[in-house]
Amino acid sequence: MKKVLKWSTGVLIIFLTFILFFAGDNTKCPTKGDSPQQKLQDLDTLKNRTIGSTKVVPLSLTDVLKPGDDTKRFTSNTYVKITGYVMLIKYGGAETCNCHSKDKTQLDIHIELVPDIKNPAATQAMVVEVNRYTRAKDKNMDVDVIKKLKGKKVEVQGWLFFDEEHKHNAVNTNPKGTFLWRATCWEVHPCLSIKEVE
């Protein structure tokens, strides 16, 4: 009986170690994330881009936030620079693009840009996200550094991305919705640089 108990305890310890190792090792999460759906894998691969572009398209935040169905207003293969005021900075959530990690080092940093900091409104915000790869590569893109930019005018650069998972949360795609906290599903995601401007 003791041998069986000792063997069972040993197997349990090995099993738990295996689970904790692979569940906690977020470097094993691929750029395509952990969704079994090809469509979400493709979208997560876009969210997890790390390379910028030499062709930078200046884009006005006012144009991005313009009312109306903007589903096809831009494309996700456009590298842009946009200026606005930082209204909110927080960690993103556990999602498919980070393999549902709860480790803060693996989460995107969620930033909301508004055109007027004196009269900010969530329904007039564009979302900008810094992915885990950019955070790891560039310490100036860490959450503690970015938090110092709250309320300030900044220029962000990165790839446009239409986050269709939030169509019901955006004024432009769901104007009569009841849980609206953004103007548009268009994001700068990933954001590869952010700097204060005058």
Image: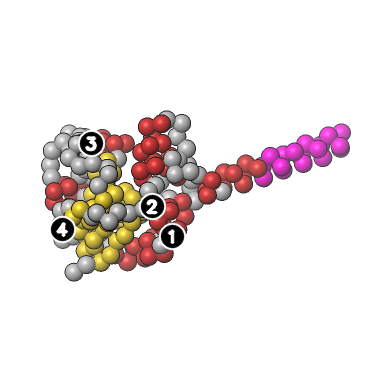
Q: Earlier in the sequence, mark 2 or mark 3?
A: 2
Please, what is the dominant secondary structure of the magenta stretch?
Answer: helix
Which residue is drawn at the image coordinates 47% and 55% (left, top)? 105
Observer-side mark, 1 or 4, equals 1
CA–CA distance in space, label 3 to label 1: 38 Å
Q: Earlier in the sequence, mark 3 or mark 1?
A: 1
Q: Measure how far apart labels 2 and 3 are at the Cα level.
A: 35 Å
Q: Is residue 15 magenta?
A: yes
181, 129: nearer the viewer: 129
Give the residue drawn at x 49%, y 51%: 103
- Residues under labels 1 and 2: Cα distance? 9 Å
195 with respect to 101 (left or right): left
> In whole angstroms, how far apart are the C-alphas of marks 1 and 4?
31 Å
Question: Counting other residues with Cα less than 10 Å from the Cα at mark 3, is it few (<14), some (14-19), or many (20 or more)?
Answer: few
Tell me which numbered mark, 1 or 4, is placed earlier along the sequence: 4
User: Do the numbered discs 1 and 2 sit on residues whose CB atoms are within 8 Å?
Assistant: yes
- The region drawn magenta spans 1-17
Disc 1: which residue: 137
Task: Look at mark 4 in the image and give the residue it sits on.
Answer: 116
